[in-house]
Amino acid sequence: MGIREVIRNLDWSYLIKLVFSIVPALVCIIVHEISHSFVAYKLGDRTSEMQGRLSLNPLRHIDPIGLLMLAVFRFGWAKPVSVNMYNFKKPKRDMAITAFAGPLSNMLLAAFCLFLYGLLWKTLYTSSLGGTLLDLLQITAQLSVSLGVFNLIPIPPLDGSKVLFSLLPNRMYLRIMMYERFGVIFLMLILFSGVLSGPLYRITSAVYGSLFPIAIFAFKLV
């Protein structure tokens, strides 16, 4: 089979859908990671800023497997932002704030995308290009909610663990953080077992549904 036949037989609809997932996924990941870096920087830790993580360059933030998971399965992760909690005035509290900044930024991004979706609907929905832009806004909102919800799971190294563990006594907190890297193995086992798929889908759908009235509100403004 020649190259032309291969190209002709490709499922272009699937490839287009994949692109439509990857581009919004990159936006969600960049916003998420920059938020971590920015908040850490403002709270006194310049580690991530010196490593170039306060950047719009997606190559500085993406984890290839995490990006693929987000694009295909709607749940994924990015390259962890390096934070030295001992640069904070209140290490446990500020670490929790830095961690929570990522998921919070995703919820705000989703709200912003839905606002634009409703605001631009009447103008764009009749054209092919406009419909594509509306689809991208909606997909970005959905993926952003998914990324935010997923990262709130209290399993290291996800953000939710840093927020939850900040409530523990100092000695226990430091001991758990020392073994944080091993949480990745546990997390992957849980993900591939499918145990979390149902609960994550239901929570994500509920959060997205609670944000969608923003689009309706914006639609009525026009």
Image (spheres, grey):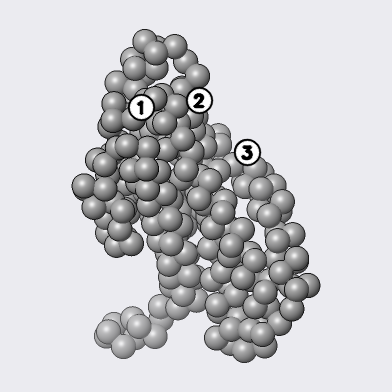
C-alpha distance separating marks 2 and 3: 19 Å
Looking at the image, residue 166 lies above or below residue 56: above
Which residue: 69% across, 47% down? Answer: 206
Q: Is residue 71 above or below residue 156?
A: below
Helix, strand or loop status at disc 1? loop
Residue tagged 1: 89
- Under mark 2, the amino acid is Leu
Mark 2 neighbour class, 10 Å CA radius: few under 14, some 14 to 19, many 20 or more: some
Q: Nearer the viewer, mark 2 or mark 3?
A: 2
Classify residue 94 by image quadrant: top left
Answer with mark 1 or mark 3, whichever residue precedes in sequence: 1
Q: Which amino acid does the dot numbered 1 rest on? A: Lys
Q: Earlier in the sequence, mark 1 or mark 2?
A: 1
Residue pointed to by mark 3: 199
Image coords of residue 66 (percent x, y): 38, 49
Q: What percent of the width, then of the height, locates residue 177?
A: 34, 22
